[in-house]
Image (tube, rainbow, N blue to C red):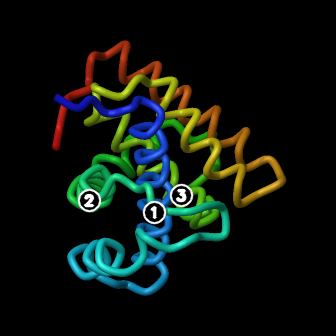
């Protein structure tokens, strides 16, 4: 019986998260649908190098779960994010890449109880940090930390996919 190396699984999920953020960003910018975007990534993009690292180790099932989950539950996800934004902030004001990362992270916080909260926050803050040198990663960290504490306090996390 073969066992999966935990580091390989971690790297594969990291690649899937990065690809999910890119796919969500692409869908928002182009207006493309989830089915065609997921298929495009599965068939052509997951084996390529990206600007921030290779996606060849991306876990395809995890990628699909996150992207399809965000789209299916976007109303709940966006409402969860909006409730935790500072006074005067609107979701639309957040940079589109940060918005994609926060949506994916929120999906994981809501529906992937098998993934530790600290891992979710660290992974998505790292993705945002790879794209920005400014305060975006701190903003993302604070927002996701607040969201995670409130979801855990209210026992709202569930397992999906």
Of badges 2 and 1, nearer the viewer stands 1
Of the residues under marks 2 and 1, which one precedes in the sequence? 1
At horizontal 51% and vertical 53% (from top left) the residue drawn is: 101
Given residues 29 and 60, the one toward you in this image is 60
Q: Position of residue 160 (x, y in %)?
A: 17, 39
Disc 3 crowd rating (10 Å Cα; few below 14, some 14-19, many 20+) is many
Determine which residue is flagged by label 2. 64
31 vs 62: above or below: below
Quadrant for the N terminus, please: top left
Determine which residue is flagged by label 1. 56
Residue 99's label in the rendered image is: 3
At horizontal 39% and vertical 32% (from top left) the residue drawn is: 5
At horizontal 41% and vertical 54% (from top left) the residue drawn is: 16
Confirm or deny contact between disc 2 and disc 1 (CB under 8 A): no
Q: Secondary structure at mark 2?
A: helix
Of the residues under marks 3 and 2, which one precedes in the sequence? 2
Residue 102's label in the rendered image is: none
Measure how far apart labels 3 and 2 are at the Cα level: 18 Å
At horizontal 57% and vertical 67% (from top left) the residue drawn is: 96
Of the residues under marks 1 and 3, which one precedes in the sequence? 1
26 vs 22: above or below: below
Measure how far apart labels 1 and 3 are at the Cα level: 24 Å
Q: Secondary structure at mark 3?
A: helix
Q: Position of residue 129 (x, y in %)?
A: 71, 49
Given residues 54 and 81, the one toward you in this image is 54
> On the rendered structure, is 153 left or right of 118?
left
Q: Secondary structure at mark 1?
A: loop
Disc 2 crowd rating (10 Å Cα; few below 14, some 14-19, many 20+) is many
Given residues 149 and 52, the one toward you in this image is 52
Quadrant for the C terminus, please: top left
């Amino acid at each position: 019986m073969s066992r999966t190396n935990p580091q390989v699984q971690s790297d594969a999920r990291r690649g899937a998260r990065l690809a999910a953020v890119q796919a969500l960003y692409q869908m928002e910018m182009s207006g493309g649908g989830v089915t065609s975007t997921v298929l495009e990534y599965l068939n052509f993009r997951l084996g390529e190098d990206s600007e921030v690292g290779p996606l060849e180790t991306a876990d395809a099932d995890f990628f699909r779960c996150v992207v399809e989950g965000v789209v299916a539950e976007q109303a709940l996800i966006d409402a969860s994010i909006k409730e935790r934004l500072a006074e005067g902030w609107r979701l639309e004001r957040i940079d589109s890449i940060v918005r994609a990362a926060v949506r994916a992270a929120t999906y994981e916080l809501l529906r992937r109880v098998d993934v530790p909260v600290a891992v979710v926050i660290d992974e998505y803050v790292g993705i945002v940090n790879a794209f920005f040198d400014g305060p975006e990663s701190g903003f993302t960290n604070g927002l996701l930390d607040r969201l995670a504490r409130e979801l855990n306090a209210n026992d709202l996390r569930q397992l999906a996919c």
